[in-house]
Amino acid sequence: MQTYTLSGIQSMLGLSRAVVTGLVAAGFVTPSRGKRREYRFSFQDVVLLRTAYSLQAAKIPAGRIVRSLKRLKASLPSELPLTGLRITAVGSDVAVREGNRQWAAESGQLLMDFEVKPAQGSVEVLSGMVPDDRLASARAAFELGLSLEDDAPAEAEQAYRESIRIAPEFVDPYLNLGVLLIEAGRASDAVTLCRQALKAGLSEPLLYFNLGVAYEDLGDTGQALDCYATCIRLAPDMADAHYNAARLHEQLGHATQAIRLYSEYRRLQR
């Protein structure tokens, strides 16, 4: 079965690394791991990522999205049928149409219509143009960083830092570079970067999640817990933040907090 890399998903769907990893962290998709522990996404994951992102943007509760999409994922074919698939809201249900057949994936309050069509073996998604020239330049540097991550991480770092220099309010390069630095064992640099983003007025939950991971790597459990708590406050449905915080509380002997957070993590994974 064909699988897709994280970079391939980003290019195919026009989603940032931050968005994709955020949806993985929230439990919308569960990609496998390759030989180097990299994410490998199936065709079903491709469809579900775009679906989850659209529904999340429509302010649908994450738990309801997860229940619907888990049922949908189980029913999707391993390859896109020639007739294509249309996934749409019908009343309060998620409806899936294949040719002349239509079925309900799961009940839920849904607000958006969108379509998945074959386009030379991949999923075709149209993305909007960035009207501001400065942001367009920052986006170009960001996309360059994306293309360099796997084979030239040092050059990818330079591209992300150039994107940040051009548009300090553009959050995606901070998020991607933060993960890149953490994976390279440069936790101190990741903390500096995340603090720079927060000083610029950004308040993305994944910034606090990355910061928490970086502080963990530095052995600063207190700061890590503070970051995970802020992440949970901003994004109550981010399952991985609950899990990481629960694990740290367990290590510290805080049984009550650990049990509460583990319970919430399990609820979000249903």
Image (cartoon, rainbow, N blue to C red):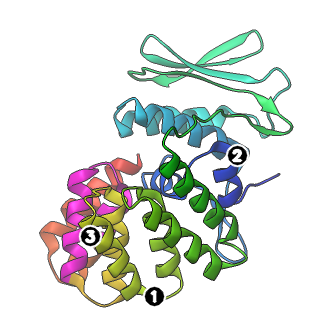
Q: What residue type is labelled 3?
A: Ala
Query: Which of the two discs, 2 and 1, labels the residue nearer the N terminus?
Result: 2
- Taking 49 as reference, is 256 left or right? left
Seen at 32% across and 63% down, the residue is 241
Residue 113's disc number: none
> Can the viewer see residue 39 in this picture?
yes
Q: Quadrant of the C terminus?
A: top left
Camera-side residue: 264 or 12?
12
Vertically, is 24 above or below 221? Answer: above
Which percent across, then down, holds residue 62? 37, 39
Look at the image and say whether residue 224 sits in the magenta stretch: yes
Look at the image and say whether residue 56 sits in the magenta stretch: no
Residue range (magenta)? 222-244
Which percent across, then down, holds residue 73? 62, 38
- Taking 162 as reference, is 99 left or right? right
Q: What residue type is labelled 1?
A: Arg
Residue 12's disc number: 2
Q: Which amino acid does label 2 sit on?
A: Met
Seen at 18% across and 81% down, the residue is 222
- Taking 197 as reference, is 181 left or right? right
- Residue highlighted by disc 3: 245
- Residue highlighted by disc 1: 186
